[in-house]
Image (cartoon, rainbow, N blue to C red):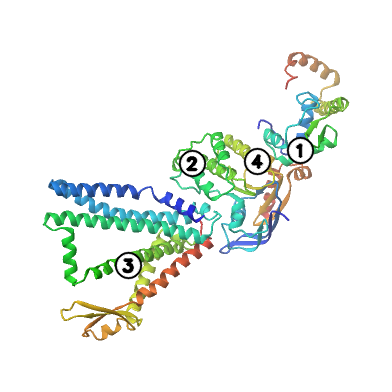
Amino acid sequence: MALIEISNLNKSYGSKLVLNDLSLNLEAGRIVGLLGPNGCGKSTLLKILAGLISAYDGAVLLDGHKPDIHTRAIVSYLPERTYLSGWMRPVDAFDYFGDFYGDFDRVKAEDMLRFFNLDQKQQIKTMSKGMKEKLQLILVMARRARVYLLDEPMGGVDPAARSAILDAVLKNYQDDALMVLATHLIYDVEKIFDEAVLLGFGQLVMQGETDQLRQQYGKSIDEIFREVFRCSVSW
Amino acid sequence: MSYEFDNHAPIYLQLIELFNQKIVNGSWTAGDRVASVRELALEFGVNPNTVQRALAEMEREGMMYTERTSGRFITQDQQLISDTRQQLAEEKIDQFINQMQGLGLGRDELKQLIDRKWGKNNGADRNQ
Amino acid sequence: MFGKLVKHEFRATRRIVPFVWLGTIVMAVLNLITGRIGIDWLFATSLIFLVILAVAQIILTYAVIITRYYRSLYSDEGHLTHTLPVRPSRVLASKTLVSFAWMISSVVMALVVVVVIATTIGSKNGYTLSQMYQEFRAAFAFTDGQMALVIGLFVVYVIYALLLQLAQIFFAISFGSQAVFHKLSIAAPIIFYLVFNFALEMIMLVATIFLPIGVEMQLDANGMPDSFSLVARGMFDLIRNPEQPQVVFGLGGIILSVFAMAGLFYGSYLLIKKHTSLR
């Protein structure tokens, strides 16, 4: 049984269909790149898996459960937005995560804070966008979760910080966990994926092992992606 | 993450080439224990499963072997190592010759050029 | 988990109001001292500030409660709140408990200020606090036991009124933050609060007049309250027939509002559980 099983998933906002009969299985022990143009449903899919959106049609199972309070305990979700209160400092955020998530490893979080050169006592409202993103990544990666859902983890940071973030992701990733990383910065990240899922217009366009796709097409995942979605304009 | 991989080709093949290179030039010593998948993945900034696949492939080719309790080791078969070195060198030279021919260089011209350059670059090219 | 929710709810709301309380207490002490030793300009100034602070701390308490509820559930922070491995009912209960604690504390603080002002101004005019109590009691011809009942009823009423208001505030924010109303932004919760509040008041008024349940108060010869009894009549009788010697207080509105409060809390719970309303 796959760790995440999605079948015939439909989700619309008003008259706009965001996920269109999507079926997808994702196995434990993998780092999956969830790739697609903006507005193709990546964020919506992650929100459904995280238990943030409960109104949808179709079946979604994580470890055999519908998204609910049980799955939230095993899912570590990083949204695009800053979800911490401005008055909090990293120490307060650690207290918060430590209290609500049994799998939160505070020592690891403090290590990562040093690694990213962040100050334990700096208030979040005085942090730059990049610092906030790093702090949230720390919180999410310091959990020993079974499923990690990262939505554009490198959206607002400079290229130097991107590789530091990738390092942090690889370093703290558990071998038996499933990591789903949604991004549009494919070229920078694709070497850490072992599986790529291409979403377009709410549908599964392509799913495969990255090295196999490279061999088959003789191209990078980034190029395959561009090619697929160049064609898709004329759909 | 100082290693640049070519995203156009399978990364596990590039890892195999890189690891073989380290074995044949001696920076990974014959008979030594290989670092864990996790460490290698971090060092080269790639997916652990990709590293695992490269190492499994190298085991199949005999460049590495696994001892059930103590882990994965580099082969002590010097013959295999030197064959691999030979093979890697031949592949590179084939590519090189192809490229030089593409520039219109003949065999003698190329030999002269190599002799002249070799003196200048010597010492710098060993430890690369 | 409930205890942890309460703890973090408290942490998130404790940053402003306690400091205002501290200021209020300092000002109250200053007022008492200057009133006693007779520095009139400082007494007058501290009195003005005391009144301002007493009002400000209540307004601030409401502001803190409202912004905390809105932000933690319906701003970007909702991404965290709604992905915690806790039941939505616990989330709502923790917010209700902590918000109520702040509200009741700010009301108590306001009462303390009233008592302080009554003491200082009273002493200027030669009254003590206990004299004022005795005069109030005599005015209605209450016994001490009846006064205790009146005070008890007042406390119950304050608690109830605060809870009812909290239920309305929470529901108005939850309802007004639904995706359909995103265009209205923060105007939506405010409009809905006013609309729901008006509707509830109207319904309560109608129920008070027409629902046949009430407390009847018999008056004695001096027009003072004599005895109370529960009757199966609303206030409608009184309106038809204002000359009768008893006064009836309709209970229909209050009884109905209990159901309304339960409904509002339940509605907020359902909306939190559904949480499809993040921007």
Looking at the image, residue A110 lies above or below residue C118: above
Residue position for label 2: A91
Residue A189, labelled with which disc?
4
Give me the chain letter of mark 1.
Answer: B
Determine if marks 2 and 3 fall on one subunit.
Answer: no
Disc 2 and disc 1: Cα gap in Å? Answer: 40 Å
In this rendering, would A113 be left or right of C39? Answer: right
- The quadrant of the picture occupied by the C terminus of chain B is top right
In this rendering, would C140 be left or right of B3? Answer: left
Percent x, y for residue A131?
51, 39
Kindly state the secondary structure of the residue where label 3 is placed: helix
10 Å crowding of disc 1: few (<14), some (14-19), many (20+): many
10 Å crowding of disc 3: few (<14), some (14-19), many (20+): few
Sequence-earlier tag: 4 or 2:
2
Amino acid type for the residue under numbered disc 3: Tyr
Residue position for label 3: C157
Mark 2 vs mark 1, foreground winner is 2
The residue located at (78%, 32%) in the rendering is B17
Amino acid type for the residue under numbered disc 2: Val
10 Å crowding of disc 4: few (<14), some (14-19), many (20+): many
Q: Disc 3 vs disc 1: Cβ atoms closer than 8 Å?
A: no
In this rendering, would C115 be left or right of B96? Answer: left
